[in-house]
Image (cartoon, rainbow, N blue to C red):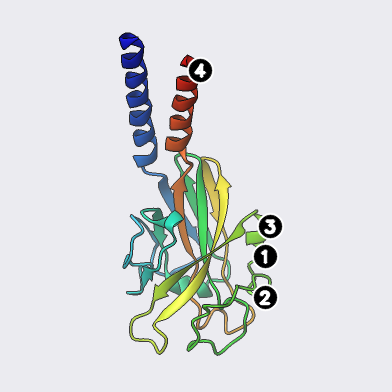
Amino acid sequence: MMFRKRLLLGLALGISTVAVQVTSAAIITSIERRNSDKTYPQIAGPLVEGALGYVDRTYEYNQIPVALVDAEYIKVANDDKKSQYYELDVTLSQDATLYLLLDNRLGHGPGLGGRSGRLWDPYLSPAGMSWIIDAGFVDTGADISVHEFGTSVAFKWSSVYAKDVSAGKITLLQQYDASTDRGRDRNMYGVAVVPEPATLLLLGLGGLMLRRKR
């Protein structure tokens, strides 16, 4: 009995160690942007309150949904909201959930600089972003805010879209909002990733083995 307990304890510790190694490894291994001469994006993280969202602005992420806390993310160029043929390749080392943070003002027409978009949803087709739905991203119902220092309405809100993806390269496309002056008064969409729940899966396996032993 004592040997069995030690064996199961060792197995549980081994599973936990593997899980930590899997989830702590860098998920985003490289990025490549095309068709833009704006400031080049950067791999960043963790995503926490006050983290900078852009390489060309001092805007910060706030009110971060629980699922995105400590996520890896990409500091994109906000000026790329006007890059018509924008493409961003994101290469992942493991299966993950990929999140897009979409300004709620997208597709709503011009003159929205003084609106937060808090109670809105983005209209993707008028914004030239039907590719997001075609690619299988879905609205999670969660929102994240971007703190724009020095603007008339400091907090702007974005909807969180998500898709489970496999390891490898994913290509993201443009935010060339045709409903307004090509993106004026919008923020460029953000990108974040979290690993698949490897820890929970492995711990669940350990629990199943314990039940079988009994």
* Contact between labelled residues 2 and 1, with CB atoms less than 8 Å apart: no
Residue 59 vertical position relative to residue 27 in the rendered view, above or below: below
Give the structural element (helix, strand or loop) at label 3: helix
Residue lying at 34% horizontally and 34% vertically, measured from the top left: 21
Q: Residues within 10 Å of mark 3 (few under 14, many from 20)?
A: few
Circle nearer the viewer, 4 or 1: 4
**Which residue position is annotated with label 3?**
134
Amino acid carrying mark 4 in the image: Arg
- Mark 2 element type: loop
Q: Quick one: 127 or 200, which is closer to the camera?
A: 200
Please identify, in this view, whether the residue under mark 3 or under mark 4 is nearer the observer: 4
What residue sits right under mark 2 in the picture? 126
Amino acid type of the residue that numbered disc 2 sits on in the rendered structure: Pro
Q: Position of residue 201 (x, y in %)?
A: 48, 34
Q: CA distance from mark 3 to mark 2?
A: 14 Å
Q: Amino acid at mark 1?
A: Ser
First reached walking from the N terminus: tag 3 or tag 4: 3
Say whether disc 2 or disc 4 marks the residue closer to the N-terminus: 2
Mark 4, secondary structure of its residue: helix
> Quick one: label 4 or label 1, which is nearer the N terminus?
1
Give the structural element (helix, strand or loop) at label 1: helix
Q: Residue 151 at x, y = what percent?
A: 38, 87
Q: Amino acid at mark 3?
A: Asp
Q: What residue sits right under mark 1 in the picture?
A: 130
Q: Position of residue 48 (x, y in %)?
A: 33, 60
In the image, taking residue 169 as reference, residue 53 lies left or right, namely left
Name the residue carrying label 4: 212
Q: Residue at x 49, y 21 (%)?
A: 211
Based on the displayed image, in which of its 4 quarters is residue 79 positioned?
A: bottom left
Q: Residue at x 55, y 90 (%)?
A: 111
Q: Are marks 1 and 3 in contact (CB under 8 Å)?
A: yes
Q: Mark 4 and 1 residues: CB-CB less than 8 Å, in contact?
A: no
